[in-house]
Amino acid sequence: MKKSVQTLPKITLKQLAVFVSIYQTGSTSRASKELHLSQSAVSSALTELESRLQMPLFERVGRRLNQHPNAHPIYVQAQAILGQSLTLEHYHQYQAGQIHIGASTTIGNYVLPSLLCKLYKALPDANVDMYIANTQEVVSEVEQLNIDIALVEGMPRPIDMKAIEQHKWRTDTLMIFAKRDSKWLKNVAIYSEDENCYQLTINQLAQLPLLVREAGSGTRQIIDEQLLKYLPNAEVVKAIHQSEAIKHMVSADIGLGCLSQHVIETELATGELVQVSVAGIDLSRTWWLVWHKARHQSPIWQTFIDIIQQD
């Protein structure tokens, strides 16, 4: 009986590293500077990789390189292979506890700190890198294998659904709010002493200025899907990138805001801000855990997952 012969791959890590660098920088000259290789060596490595794969990765237009449709799926796989190679090369660092955590803005600013406190208690030598941005940006970093695990507020919408794991984590509620005794609510809203909030109808809310997060944020996604669709003529002042900015603008009585309850809980407790309840509007949402299936799941990764699931 013949022994099976194991076929060794002819694609090299150098070829993959060159391709990833060209994909990210957009040119062989910038890739050569980044990798400290000659431009001819970079071009040669790319040509060899395309030959091994038997497919083009870039289209040559004069001196420019335009990404071929084949490039993105190969890029994702190349990132995974290079990431795993680095993990193997620096395994002791992962054993010591290295993790890259991504979080959308509200979670990163108001929820993640307490989770990190628990992680450091469990693993005092943990080496944590954090990336905080809106949901769309964080999920993009997960897809590019730059983040081990992410916690996001909006529904993850990755390009390649098969490559990404996404699990429901917890439920959060957005809240419409205003400055106490706001000029916008005088002679318009009814104040309920029992519920400690103003009460508006949808039509009344549509006549008032509303400050919201920018497109791409998890908060804005819920506002679009569960609030603004009922307010086609709403007077939205502008989309704002920072929740803190919205909170301070509402405190200055520039308009009403809509943010997670976590963002304004201190101001609600002191009475500086007050909830505005709108009949028929449900602003609850799901928070998600997201990671790339190809990403190395180190011991610290599993510890962090255990902390999240107990939270």
Image: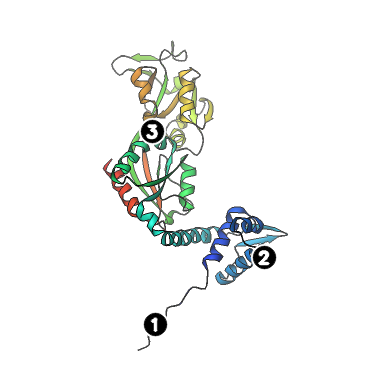
Tell me which label, 2 or 1, sits earlier in the chain.
1
Point out residue 166 in the picture as x, y percentages from the top left corner.
38, 49
**Amino acid type, residue under disc 3 in the picture:** Tyr
Tell me which label, 2 or 3, sits earlier in the chain.
2
- In this rendered view, identify the residue nearer to me: 124 or 72: 124
Q: Label 3 to label 1, Cα distance in Å?
A: 56 Å
Q: Mark 2 near mark 1, Cβ–Cβ under 8 Å?
A: no
Q: Of discs 2 and 3, which sits in the foreground?
A: 2
Q: Label 2 to label 1, Cα distance in Å?
A: 38 Å
| Residue at horizontal 43 percent and vertical 23 percent from the top | 202
Point out residue 293 in the picture as x, y percentages from the top left corner.
40, 56
Left or right: 152 in relation to 64: left
Q: Of discs 2 and 1, which sits in the foreground?
A: 2
**Quick one: SS at disc 1?**
loop
Instruction: Please give the residue where the numbered disc 2 appears in the rendered image.
Output: 40
User: In the image, which disc is placed on residue 41?
Assistant: none
**Quick one: SS at disc 2?**
helix
Task: State which quadrant residue 56 falls in.
Answer: bottom right
User: In the image, which disc is placed on residue 4?
Assistant: 1
Mark 2 Cα shell of 10 Å, populated few (<14), some (14-19), many (≥20): few
Q: Label 2 to label 3, Cα distance in Å?
A: 49 Å
Q: Mark 2 near mark 3, Cβ–Cβ under 8 Å?
A: no
Instruction: Please give the residue where the numbered disc 3 appears in the rendered image.
Output: 110
| Residue located farthest toward the top when viewing the structure as drawn | 187
**Quick one: SS at disc 3?**
helix
| Residue at horizontal 41 percent and vertical 62 percent from the top | 88
Point out residue 100 in the picture as x, y percentages from the top left corner.
42, 48
**Amino acid type, residue under disc 2 in the picture:** Ser
Image quadrant where one finds the C terminus: top left
